[in-house]
Amino acid sequence: MKLGGNGPITANALAVLGLTVTYVGAVGWPSLHPVFGELALRAKVFGVAEPGHTDALEFEDGKLMLTKTVSLNDVTWPVLQQRFGRDPLLAALAESDLVGFVNWTMIPFMSDLWEALLGEGCPHFPQTPRTLFIDLADPQKRTVADMRRALDLIQRFGPWFQVVLGLNEKEAWGIAGVLGVVTPRRDRAALARAAQAIARQVKLHTLVVHPVSYALAVSEGTLVEVEGPYEPNPKITTGAGDHFNAGFCLERLLGLDLASALLAGVGTSGFYVRHAKSPSLADLSALLRQGQS
């Protein structure tokens, strides 16, 4: 048994990289589940619901994720206000340089939560260039209407945040299909074109797509691609995408360019799948200095 869930894995990776992190989510209620004890030593951790459970079966050609997530039904705007507090939550969102919402797919009421924040919180937030990172997490499990509503809500955060949407390759093709983007093939060039088409339709600051061996991003009409440190024999793959997101967000907070942020993302993910642990800033720097070899 290990710490899991997109949120806790991302929060832990950010904390190991040296950021001050506040995490609010399904990590135990009324008391913290012991598996998140180490995260609580690195970050401020607040549970509002019992955690979900996933049996992750990893193979050389893929993995099966067997999930039990009924407890995530408790992650709602009313429950957050009751168990964490409306004012503390809005204050944390207003003061943070980076705000992240992840695992929209498995949290049924996330869109309702976003709508509440857009109505009750955002009008009082400072209009400063802060980052909002969103990872939908395999949206094919949701209806087309759900996905279209989510994409509409994400765009509406634009006046208060530089909105970044992160997708893996499968998720990118899924969103492209919802938006009516059709490509005759599904190769690297086609994925780049699909990403550009998504970025034209969904008004974001940055769209990020991270396949297994490389990553690309579209921001303000510019497409950037970087190669990753592909590992043919990973020690672990569950959580690799969350580590990519953490590394990418770190570099965006440091104000570096898009290519550097992508390199940090693939480097953080690459270190994790090789060593089955989150890299420190020194670990990430050493990997990138070695030419990702």
Image: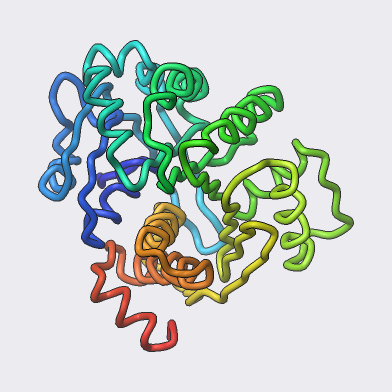
On the rendered structure, is 42 left or right of 130? left
Query: Which sits in the foreground, 77 or 211?
Result: 77
On the rendered structure, is 85 left or right of 133? left
**Residue at the limit of the structure toward the bottom, as seen here:** 290
> Above or below — where is 114 with respect to 201?
above
Residue 237 lies, in percent from the top left, at 43, 59
**Residue at the limit of the structure toward the right, as seen here:** 184
Residue 41 lies, in percent from the top left, at 10, 47
Query: Which sits in the foreground, 11 or 18?
Result: 18
- Where residue 74 sits, quadrant-wise, is top left
Query: Which sits in the foreground, 254 or 178?
Result: 254
Residue 4 visible (yes or no): yes
For the point 41% across and 71% down, which residue is it? 267
Residue 232 visible (yes or no): no
For the point 77% across and 51% down, which residue is it? 197
Residue 179 lies, in percent from the top left, at 77, 38
**Residue at the limit of the structure toward the front, as seen here:** 127
Which quarter of the rendered picture does the C terminus lie within?
A: bottom left
On the rendered structure, is 53 left or right of 202? left
For the point 75% across and 36% down, which residue is it? 178
Residue 264 lies, in percent from the top left, at 41, 69
Q: Name the colouring of the figure.
A: rainbow
Number of numbered tags placed on the structure image: 0
- Where residue 144 sits, quadrant-wise, is top right
> Above or below — where is 78 with respect to 105?
above
For the point 37% across and 31% down, which residue is it? 125
Which quarter of the rendered picture does the N terminus lie within?
A: top left
> Above or below — where is 8 with respect to 15?
above
